[in-house]
Every structure is written in structure tokens, then in C-alpha cells.
Image: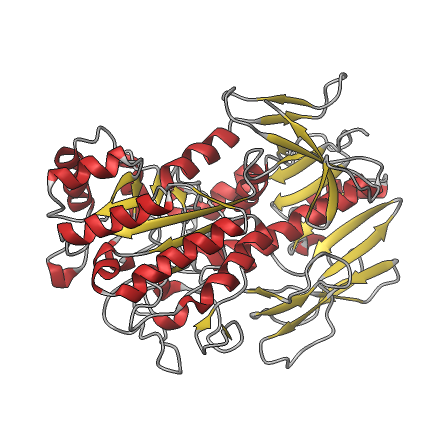
Amino acid sequence: MNVANIGIIFDEVNAEKNWANGSNVFENFLFEILDHFRLPYKKINEIDEYNDFDLLIVGHTSNSVAASAKILAYVHAGGTVVSYGGLDAIRSKLGFANMFSSSKGYADLSAFLNQPTPLRFLDAQPWIQKGNLEVKEFGSVSDEAKTWQGASALQKIQYGTGTIERWSIPIPQTIVGLQQGTKAVVEDGTPAPDGSANLDEDILKAEDGFELDWVLDRAFTESGMPYFPHPYADLWKEVIMEHLIKIALGKGLTLPFLDLWPAGVEHVAMISHDSDLNVDESAQITLDTLKAADVQTTWCMIAPGYSPSIYDQIKENGHEIALHYNALEMEDGVWSEETFHSQKEWLEKATSTAQIVSNKNHYTRFEGWGELYVWCENNGIQVDQSRGPSKKGNVGFLFGTCHPYFPIAWADEKNRLYDVLEIGFLTQDLNHNTLSDVSVIQPFLNGVKLVNGVAHFLFHQHHIYNQPKVKEAIIQLITTAKEQGFTFWTSKQINDWERARRSVTIDGTSRSGIKVTSLDEESDFVLLIPVADNVESDLVVKRFGICCKQVRVN
């Protein structure tokens, strides 16, 4: 089976105009989504030739008459175009009109994709047909209050001998909004109506910009613990993948991609700690607990730190030493690159560590949009873990993701991708007397397994030492996760693996078949090749509900 040749139209000239006007082009995040899966594609401009491509994705265009005519000519001649919203310049030519103004809501895709849960979106641009073209409609979208319903999630429009598959939802922008918010963090977020998450405490945090709904998006465990159960952003990524792969299979082609974890690793979990009060006894009991459980974790250190003997044990036991940047004003912290740099230099000197790789901000402090990531880049920090909950009532998939990803910048930095891997966390200090109990462990593991992400849990050493139930919780988490096939990695290990994956290139144009190249010859990569038939074999796994043949790369 040949590999589908995908082109992604991204007009750089028009994007530059948008950026000059201060407008975001979050469509650029589509490349991060596909690069995460290592899906083969070619980025093209409006002036490039389209005819050699089996499938065109409209990323960002000028909406000019010439650009629109070229897309329509490609479709009319038998091509397939996919668009996530947009295509406004050809809407009337195709005989469609805007259905209503956009708003937040939910898309039900269960009838045609492997998505049983309605997925939250932050914007919708559905069309209504006024002309007489042949149109097939899939799924449905509705707003939060269900004041409007009946619009389709996807329209497959026959034009000439080709088709336009247009989503009503601008999916890449929705994923960005879920993961990073829709605006810079400059004020407190809205607190939970039930009093379980007081975000309005005059401390700017990552969670102040979250985009989920306190009522519609939360669930409760059997013990009454509220939590956000759905990794919406990751599920939207799977929607993109499943849809593209099914289009390719329908053409008698395939779209190979790279599995998210190495051969032999079924699921990945991570535990991090924030040293906070820096009591040696709390560090020691944590070290002893982890050694008995045979698990390596990431230790985020805040000044003044532990005694040197503690750091020696951390290293000897295979744990990672990371930064816990303190910008909390009540502790004389300052939100500035100078402070970030000085704290990182202190840590490297205090722990005799040549290069700190990971950081998590104390109290999840966060301001603006991308300043933190720029500081990380400038200081050699490759991983951030600051996007997670600090309250009892907002634990879980608060930002819709458990996937490691490279965040996107604002328009003032031309929506580039930061060279900092974000690994958010799900909850902290289970069984703490003011936080969630262990009843959330299984729902969180289930959610992570669903999308093959990272089950990242935070436990403070101080609470493990002072609250026996918290110690019981970390032991229960480790035991439960291991029983379900989770492998525990540190932040650095996840970072090293993801960056190694990004060195893999899949080329489907080779005459001898699919060619895979990598700068890393030691990692055990697994290539997945979607197949049309629903076959049973030890070499076949299901991803996005589609059977895929496994091929070991190394």
C-alpha cells in the first residue's frame, strides 16, 4: 500500500501581515500536532503546485481570489481538501452561508469517529447549504446552553470530481486554547461556584486562564471528589489523525506514523516533588519510600534547598534534580528572567549539577503568555511542568491534555513554537486534608491510557512526611499504576525520548517502500502503518480505532 502524499498550505506572506497587525495565526499549531505523531507531510505556499498531492490541508491562506480559484481547481480535478473552519472566500461560490455566530460548545462525533464523548470546542463556524452541490454531513455541534443545535461537525462537499471536507470547528486553534488559554494571564480566574477552587486569591497562576466549564466539564468520584475527566485537546488531536488516515485508506493509501512510546513501554507515568519547606527529614522519608517502590522521580528544588547529603542520595537513586522557580510575592519572589536565572544558577551550584533540564513554578505561578518559555530557552531549561491545578476542585485534565507538547507563541513572536517541552500535571498530594483523595487515581489513569499520554502526579516531600495518608497515597498510586502496565519515567527521560522521536523522519516516497531515518540509533522506535482490513495479529494494534501494523525501526 502506497503512502498518501499530503500537502499543507500555509501562506507565509499573509501570515506576516497578520503578525504585523498583532493577529494570531494559531493554525501554525497544526504542524506541532502532526510532528508529534511524525506524520509525513510537506509544507507548501499558495504559489506552489498542488496536483502531485493526494490530499491538501488548508492551514492558512490569504483568502484571495487567486488562492481560492486554485484550491477549487484542484478539487474539481479530483483532489481532496481538508479545512478546519475557514474557506470563507469560497463559501458563497460553493452555495453556502454562515449558520450563526460562533460560541463555545460541544461536538458529538460518535456516529463516524472513535470518539464516544462529546468534545468541547471554543469556537465554531458551521455552514448551511443554500446551493445544490452534493453534501454529506457528519456529527453535530451545539453551544453550551443548547440554544442552537442541528449544525454538522463535518461537511463533505462534492465539487467536480473531488471533495472538500470542511470541519465546522477550527480544531488547531481549539487545541491551543484548551492547552494554553485564549489570552495572556493578567488577572485571576473565575472561582468554582461550589467553593472548591478559589482561583481569585490575588496570585496569578497558569490555571487562571483555563477554558473548561466548572459545571459542564467536571465529574465526581464515588467519594464526591470533583475533577475534569476528559483530555479534550488530546482527543481533538486524535480526531485530526483518525480523519486523515481514513481519507487515505479510502483512497487505497496509508499514512504511517510513529507510536508515542518505545517498544515494550505500554503506558508512562511520572511523579514530581516540590521541596518547598526543605526539611531534610521529609526528603529522607520520600527517598526511602521511593526506593522501596523502585521508582525514580523528579525533584523540583526551591531555595534554600536540602543538605548536600540529600542531593547525593537523590542522584545515587537515579532521581532527577529540577528547578522549582519561586516568583511568589508573599515569599519575596519576583517574576523576572533575572530572578529565574539566579535561582537556576543557585541550584546547579548547590547540587553540583552541570545542567538543570526541568522546571516547575512554585504555586504554579504564571503570567502573560510566553515569557516563562523564553526564560527557559535562554537558560537551557528544556522542560516545564507548571501547567497544573493547585486546588481541590480543578484537578484532572484542566488544560485538556496529558501529552508532552511544544507550546506556541503569541503573534508578537510570530506564533513560533517554543523549544520547551510542556509536561503538565494532573493533581497534587492525594489524601492531603485539603485536597483530593485517592478516588481520582483510577479515572486519571484511565484518561491517560485513552490517549497514550503521561500520568503526571505531584507529591510534596513535606506532606509525605507530615501526613501519613499522603504517603499511603503515593504508594497506592505507584502500586496501581504498575499493575496496569505503567512505566515510571522522570521529566528528563520523557524529554529525551520526545526529542529523540522528533529526529525520526518518515518518507513514503521511497521506491523500496516506507523509509524511516533517525538521528538517534539507540531508541526503540515503533512505526505504525494503518491498514484497511480489521485483522487480528500480534503485530497489529489499534490507534484511533484503526488497525495498524507495528514495525520496529531499530
How many marks the image carries: the answer is 0
Image height of 130 relative to 368, above or below? below
Query: Where is residue 240 shown, x and y percent of the image?
Result: 65, 49
Left/right placement of residue 537 relative to residue 456 reads right
Q: Residue 485: image x %, image y %?
A: 54, 47
Name the outermost residue toward the front. 292
The image position of residue 346, as x and y in percent, is 13, 39
Q: Is the residue 352 above or below the residue 417 in the image?
A: above
Is 413 above or below relative to 514?
below
Q: State left or right for residue 499 relative to residue 246.
A: left
| Quadrant placement of the C terminus | top right
| Residue 509 visible (yes or no) | yes
Q: Nearer the viewer, residue 49 or 216?
A: 216
Figure quadrant of residue 265: top right
Q: Is residue 505 left or right of residue 431?
A: right
40 over 554 or under it: above or below: below
Residue at 33 percent of width and 46 percent of height: 292
Most foreground residue, 154 or 388: 388
Residue 274, percent across and down?
25, 52
| Residue in the picture at 25% in, 31% down | 355
Residue at 85% x, 39% y: name it.
77
45 displayed left or right of 12: right
Judge whether residue 174 can be spotted in this image.
Answer: no
Q: Residue at x 55, y 60 (%)?
A: 232
The image quarter in which residue 388 lies = bottom left
Quadrant for the N terminus in the image: top right
